[in-house]
Image: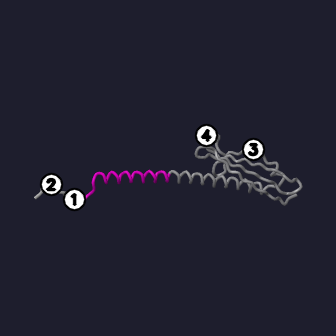
Amino acid sequence: MRQGYTHILRPGFTLMEILVSLVVLAIGCLAVVSMQTSTMEGGAQAYHTTVASFLAESEIERLQSMSRGRALASPATPAHLTRDGSACPPADVARGVCFTRTTTIVDRTPTSQNLWVSIRIDFPGRSQQQSLIYDTLIFYLDF
């Protein structure tokens, strides 16, 4: 009878199998964290875009409620606003966390009753300021 090593089958995992599975698990966890970060950044960008649209729409509605002459006479100075449209505190303006709305009104055809309105909203982005520009034509019925 030949003597040698006998291989005994035992239930369980080897150390190498456990290490490989831990490496695969770590890579999977890193991928999930990376996806979560991208999702949060995308959500913040969508939120800022929605707020910018709200601020532009409220300015358009304000101009539509005025007469054509009053709309033309309204100042074109930039307004620093919070996300709900109220005035931004000076400390937040200095930190650059406010939305800045700049409205430009152009009377391209003085004989007609329409005004070309361009509204630019600047807001803080992930690494730099971002801007959205809304252009519209407002038709007035008053003469």
Crowd rating for badge 2 (residues with CA inside 10 Å; few <14, some 14–19, many 20+): few
Identify the amino acid type marked 3: Thr
Q: Which residue is mark 4?
A: 95
Q: Earlier in the sequence, mark 2 or mark 4?
A: 2
The span picked out in magenta is 11-36
The alpha-carbon separation of the residues under discs 1 and 3 comes to: 80 Å
- Mark whose residue sits in front, 2 or 4: 2
Residue at image coords 67%, 47%:
122
Badge 2 vs badge 4, beta-carbon distance below 8 Å: no
Depicted 61 relative to depicted 75: above or below:
below
Q: Earlier in the sequence, mark 2 or mark 3?
A: 2
Crowd rating for badge 1 (residues with CA inside 10 Å; few <14, some 14–19, many 20+): few
> Observer-nearest residue: 78 or 91?
78
Q: Which residue is mark 2?
A: 4
Q: Earlier in the sequence, mark 1 or mark 3?
A: 1
Q: Earlier in the sequence, mark 4 or mark 3?
A: 3
Q: Which residue is mark 1?
A: 10
Q: Secondary structure at mark 3?
A: loop
